Each structure stands twice: as structure tokens, then as C-alpha cells.
Amino acid sequence: MNKPDTPPTNTSPEFGVGLELCSILVVDDEPGMRNFLTKILGPRCKRVEQAADVEEASKLLDNNHYDIVILDNILPGKSGLEWLREQRQVGFFADAILITAFADLETAIQALRAGAVDFVLKPFRSNQILNAVARSMDRLHLQRENYLLKYELSADATAGRGRLLGNSKEIVDIRETLQRVAPLPTPVLFTGDTGTGKEIAARTLHAMSDRADKPFVPVNCASFSPEVIANELFGNVQNDPSQAHGRQDGLLLYASGGTLFFDEIAEMPLSLQATLLRVIEEMRIRPFGSQREVPLNLRFIFATNADLPAAVEQGKFREDLYHRINVLNVRMPTLRERISDLPELAAMFMKKLSHELRVPPLPLTEQVLLKLSCYDWPGNVRELRNLIERSLILGEFPQEFSCGDEDDTDAAPDSLQAVERRHILTVLDACGGNRAEAARRLGVSRKTIDRKCAMWDV
């Protein structure tokens, strides 16, 4: 064996910040080389395992996922490049770094054709192999980020970003539920009308979990055809060893370690529901064209505004999948049900959208907020956002929400008192007549509610 230099003892991040998350398989028939590479990489990487031959390496790949395989080219039975070509045909989901004592052009060409991303010439220094691993991890990280960014932009996924605002009892209860379930792997199903903030709640759950620094990947099941969504989720392997890039990873692999959010899950094609059920239960996937499964590390969150039990009855949604994803059902309230949160939501949208549109914010006066509070909001929080954006563009609120000096009954003081009365009575009705709860939601004292009710003979 060509003896390399002594491995460095420092563990500084000079070789890249992604090294500590890297899992590596070392394939070499020489014990000294395997142990040396493990000694170099072990303190810096998440996991380093060894294989003395291609048979052992194949078995390890069947049961584990590795980011990088460091592969000696001269192995008993077959060369490392021959084994790599075979593995690509059954599914090879790692970057291969070839170590070789021969640096001729033909070997380099064969390595590229077989799918190796780098090769290191023996004898090598410790820094050379560390730099090769760091380059590979940088490339994987950049590829993953670019794919997810491209996907989010094409799917308009940024529309659901934000945080779960509000101090109404409904939102406080939901926030407490999310806090309890955040550290657990349990699937969560968000239900509720369109525009109630199901994706924002899902992002809030992700941010509360220990996966917060990993990807949050939203998938709108209604936005893709059955063929496209299958390929997007699972990826594919091209069984053609002559091609330099023989695989396309899907969202399930790119989201590894993070959270996958299936919006409008009721629209998931029936043909894929059984496959998705198996993925959730076994945490393994088999990309199209692959003979090998890949282990997953994912949190699954789902959302729908549809009646899933009715869809099950109609045969449009699998009953076993429904029971698997309905472990914890969090119903998002309508804006009407959490009307006391409207001032905070309106203020947040006004600040955010006026900044984005680069226009002055409109004043959210007491009159405006009272009129906003008396509206039914069939489109919920999303409709409120759209109204504020439209008002900022036009420079004023629509007439029915404005508080200008126009000579109409809606702007008159008597009308304002009527608006106040309707608003308080609406909140009282939502609280089942509980005046203490209504006072809490409205942000006033119980005595104020009692005095108003006495004045109105309620």
C-alpha cells in the first residue's frame, strides 16, 4: 500500500460546513487504507463505514444511504469502475470518488463515463481526500438548493410563507397543539376552508421542530398530472451506463431530513396513494427504474379543504391512507371564527405589502377595523390579504370599508355605533354567550360588555 501522510488532527470547518452532515462508504480491499480514510474522515463526518469488497459494499448500499462512496479502482474480482457501472443500473444514489494509482487520460475518461465525480491519485495527502469530499458535498448542497428553489418558484410555494399570528382562543389552542407534536414524527393533517392558513400552520410546525434548519418542501397535489407528480416525488434512474448522469433525484430525496407538506392531499391520484402509504409506513422509496430502495428521513404533513371521509366513501381516496395520515387532525378556523385576530392580521399584511409594493400604508382606523370585522370573509385570511393589497394599489379601501367624509349612511356616526353593536354581538354569539370570553377576544373588560349589553337590552 502507498502510505499516505499522517492525518491532520484539527477539526476546523476549513473543508466546508457540510462535512459534519456527510455519510461516507469507503470501499477498499486494503485494511490499512480503509482505516486511514476512516481516521481522517471519522472526526469530521456524520458517519463513515467500510467495505472490503464489492459484495459487502453492495449489501451496505441496499440498506443504507450514503452521500459519498470513496472507491478504490483496483479490487479483487472486478475493478471499481466496473462495479460502479453495474450499481448505476440498479440504483446508485451517491457521489463516487475514485482513488487510483494510475492517472492516465483513459482512466479519467472511464471514471467520468462510469459516473465518478472526482478521483484522487495515490499516494495522496490527507487534505487532498478532504478537499475532494468537501467539493462533492458543496456540489450536492448546491444541487439540492437549486432544485428546491426552482421547484418553489415554479410552484408559487412562497405564497404560503409567514407565521401563525393571533391570540384568539382557537389559534392559541392550535399553537399549543403544534408545540406538543413538534418533536414527534407523527403525521399531521390540517383541515379547514380555503384561505384559513393551513400551509402557514404547517410551516409553523416545521419551524417548531428539530428539522427547522432542514428543507420544508410543499407539494400541491392538484398542480401536477399523475405522471408528473410521480416523477417529481420519486425521481428516476436511467439504466444506461453510457450516460454521465444516470439518475434524477425526486423531492422525497431532496427533502431528506426535512418536512414534506402535501397540500390538497385529496387530489393525490388514486394510482399513487398506495405507493405513498407504503413510503409513509416504511420510510423507503424506490425511484422509477431502480431495483434498489432508498431509506428516507422525513416528516410528513398533509392539508385539505375537502371532506376526506366522503372521498373515502366515494372511492376517490384510500381508506387505509386516510387513517394513516389522520393521526392528528388540526382544523383551522375561519376568519369569522377568529375575528378578534383581524386587527393583528390586517396590520401585518399592511406593513408587509406596503413595503413590498413600495407605497405608503393606509391607516387602519377604528372605523375601518370595525367595518372589516363585520364582513363575512368567505375567502378567510387570504381574502383579507388580497383586499389590503388591492387597497394599497388603488390608494384607498373599497367604499364599504372606508371611513371617508362621503355623505352616506355607512360613514355616519350612527352607522359606526351599529357596526360596533353588530361586531360585539357577533363575537358574543361565537362564544356561545360567554361574556368573559367575548371580552377577552375583543380586548376589553367584562364590565364594558355588560354595560353594552344592558344598553342594547340584550
Image (cartoon, rainbow, N blue to C red):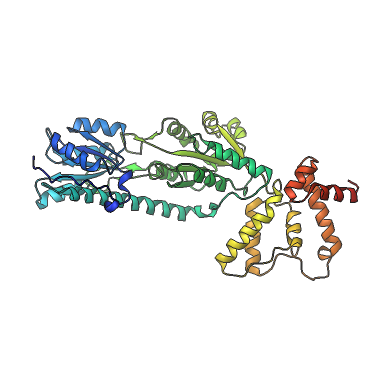
Q: Farthest residue toward the front?
A: 9
Q: Is residue 112 visible?
A: no
Of residues 361 and 444, the one nearer the viewer is 444
Q: Residue at x 69, y 47 (%)?
A: 338
Which quadrant of the figure has residue 414?
bottom right
Which x, y percent locates residue 289? Answer: 32, 38
Q: How many marks?
A: 0
Which x, y percent locates residue 455? Answer: 90, 51
Is 89 left, or right, of 431 in this rendering?
A: left
Q: Quadrant of the N terminus?
A: top left
Seen in the picture, residue 444 relative to 82 is either above or below; the reply is below
Which x, y percent locates residue 334? Answer: 67, 46
Seen in the picture, residue 86 relative to 415 is either above or below; the reply is above
Q: Residue at x 64, y 40 (%)?
A: 173
Q: Is residue 152 visible?
A: yes
Which x, y percent locates residue 118? Answer: 20, 49
Of residues 356 and 220, the one nearer the viewer is 356
Q: Residue at x 64, y 59 (%)?
A: 347
Seen in the picture, residue 71 relative to 140 is either above or below; the reply is above
Q: Residue at x 60, y 42 (%)?
A: 175
Which quadrant of the figure has residue 41?
top left
Of residues 296 and 293, the one nearer the viewer is 296
Of residues 451 and 103, the one nearer the viewer is 451
